[in-house]
Amino acid sequence: MIGDTDKAWMREAIKLAKSKGTSPEDTPIAAIIVLNGQELARAVNQTEELLDATAHAEMMAFRRAGKAHGDMDIRHATLYSTLQPCGMCTMASIWAKIGRIVYGAGRDDVHRMYFEDRHLDTIDFIQDAWREDLVIDGGCLRDACAALYFGPDDDVPIEEQGNI
Ligand SMILES: [Zn+2]
């Protein structure tokens, strides 16, 4: 269930994403990790800047959250992401003991270039995880988040599609 507090954090994440730029070409993806109502970490996608394929917004946020919390285990924290987390970031959420994932735009709202697999998705990884306490809620400010990215039918040049 997505509530007003979730929407407020997502608005914050959208603002953060836009700090990278407002064109889909800027890959404006942002993540914020919140624990007990307090922000633990925030990050944007930095793969191009750091020349690091693992520097997704969520991964960068996990790195900062671990340091801020003094522990890689951030059980009960909520991860807000403007875009549905990819397989890597979903797995990292499981390892980091995230309690809840809230995302904005989902797979069907954006171009397929944002996801590494044809069919396997975030939900599959979570449903199959040993964690019984991990909750996922998608579609928080869906339209505002989707507007940041290439749409499902956009004609994106092959060289801009990171998953092929
Ligand atoms: Zn990712």
Image: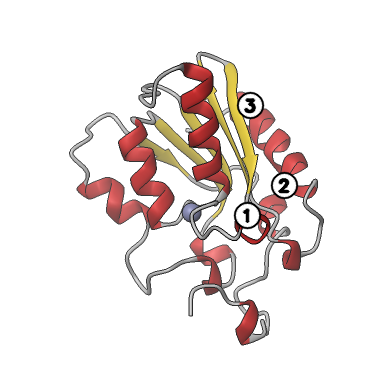
Query: What residue is at 56 percent from the left and 15 percent from the top?
Result: 37
Colouring scheme applied when the structure was drawn: secondary structure
Q: Amino acid at mark 2?
A: Ala
In screen coordinates, is 68 left or right of 74?
right
Query: What residue is at 42 percent from the left and 32 percent from the top?
Result: 100
- Residue at the extreme front of the image, as rendered: 51
Task: Write down the residue under mark 2.
Answer: 17
In screen coordinates, is 1 left or right of 157?
left
Q: Amino acid at mark 1?
A: Leu
Height in image: 48 above or below 123?
Answer: below
Mark 2 or mark 1, which is nearer to you?
1
Quarter where residue 124 is shown:
bottom left
Q: Amino acid at mark 3?
A: Asp
* Label ID, residue 4: 3
Distance Cα–Cα, label 3 vs label 1: 34 Å
Mark 1 burial class by Cα count in 10 Å: few <14, some 14-19, many 20+: few
Residue 25: horizontal and vertical position, in percent?
74, 68
Q: Secondary structure at mark 2?
A: helix
Height in image: 53 above or below 3?
Answer: below
Q: Secondary structure at mark 3?
A: helix
Distance Cα–Cα, label 3 vs label 2: 20 Å
Query: What residue is at 67 percent from the left and 52 percent from the top?
Result: 145
Residue 86: horizontal and vertical position, in percent?
44, 56
Q: Earlier in the sequence, mark 3 or mark 2?
A: 3
Task: Write down the residue under mark 1.
Answer: 50
Height in image: 158 above or below 133?
Answer: below
Under 8 Å from ligand 1: the CB of mark 2? no
Mark 3 or mark 1, which is nearer to you?
1
Contact (Cβ within 8 Å) of mark 2 with mark 1:
no
Mark 2 burial class by Cα count in 10 Å: few <14, some 14-19, many 20+: many
